[in-house]
Image: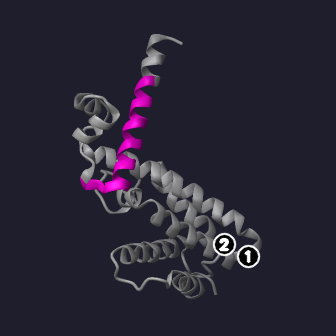
């Protein structure tokens, strides 16, 4: 391995460490606790080293969001595949549960993806591939239930918005605890699957 390759590998490892540490800190204490000073202390590098990888917290949030989007897409696809024997309704239900479970298990990552400014563009040509893939993971299942005259992409947006609303309202304590399964059933039975 050349010196240049070793330096590139070390740089990539440092970047992964920064992102993983920011993610862990956000999950433990929230994004307000994620500062370059704290990150530098935790990873035992100087703040200038952090700034050589990311211009600031916004870019770190964006990196966590992209990592989260890739994980969410994989989990959505796995859930849909595992429920394939249950038919379309089972696949859509599994999709909804997987989305809600991901958001519950990863509140800091979810915030990075959908609540905070990570400098990422959504729903545009320049949208990063990981974000496009997250949407595609929903669309792959929902296109089967769109029905005649219903644009699959539009149905996917409404379904996603509904799931996001459930996550946001539940986390804010605006919905009664204990009705999550009934909400999923209602969403799937009335919105997605005839």
Rendered image quadrant of residue 35: top left
Left or right of 185, for residue 166: left
Q: Residue at x 28, y 33 (%)?
A: 50
Q: Quadrant of the N terminus?
A: top right
Disc 1 to disc 2, C-alpha distance: 6 Å
Residue 161 sits above or below residue 176 on the image: above
Q: Within 10 Å of the Cα at label 2, are there few (<14), some (14-19), or many (20+) other Cα atoms?
A: many
Secondary structure at badge 2 equals helix
Q: Are marks 1 and 2 in contact (CB under 8 Å)?
A: yes
Percent position of residue 151, x then y: 54, 75
Rendered image quadrant of residue 27: bottom left
Question: Is residue 14 rendered magenta in the image?
Answer: yes
Question: Is residue 31 rendered magenta in the image?
Answer: yes
Q: Residue at x 42, y 19 (%)?
A: 7
- Magenta region's main secondary structure? helix
Read off the magenta span: 10-32
Residue 11 sits above or below residue 177 on the image: above
Q: Residue at x 52, y 67 (%)?
A: 101
Q: Mark on residue 87?
A: 1
Secondary structure at badge 1 equals helix
According to the picture, the residue beneath numbered tag 2 turns out to be 91
Left or right of 50, for residue 193: right
Residue 38 sits above or below residue 126 on the image: above
Left or right of 52, for residue 124: right
Rendered image quadrant of residue 169: bottom left
């Amino acid at each position: 391995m050349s010196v240049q390759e070793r330096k590139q590998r070390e740089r990539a490892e440092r970047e992964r460490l920064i992102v993983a540490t920011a993610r862990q800190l956000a999950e433990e204490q929230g994004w307000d606790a994620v500062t370059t000073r704290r990150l530098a202390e935790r990873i035992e590098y100087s703040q200038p080293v952090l700034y050589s990888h990311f211009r600031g917290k916004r870019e770190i949030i964006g990196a966590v969001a992209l990592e989260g989007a890739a994980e969410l897409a994989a989990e959505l696809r796995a859930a849909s595949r595992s429920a394939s024997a249950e038919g379309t309704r089972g696949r859509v239900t599994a999709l909804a549960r997987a989305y809600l479970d991901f958001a519950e298990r990863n509140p800091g990552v979810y915030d990075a993806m959908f609540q905070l400014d990570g400098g990422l563009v959504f729903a545009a040509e320049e949208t990063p591939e990981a974000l496009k893939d997250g949407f595609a993971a929903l669309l792959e299942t929902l296109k089967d239930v769109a029905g005649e005259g219903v644009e699959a992409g539009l149905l996917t947006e409404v379904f996603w918005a509904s799931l996001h609303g459930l996550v946001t309202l539940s986390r804010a304590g605006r919905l009664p605890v204990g009705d999550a399964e009934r909400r999923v059933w209602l969403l799937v039975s009335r919105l997605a699957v005839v």
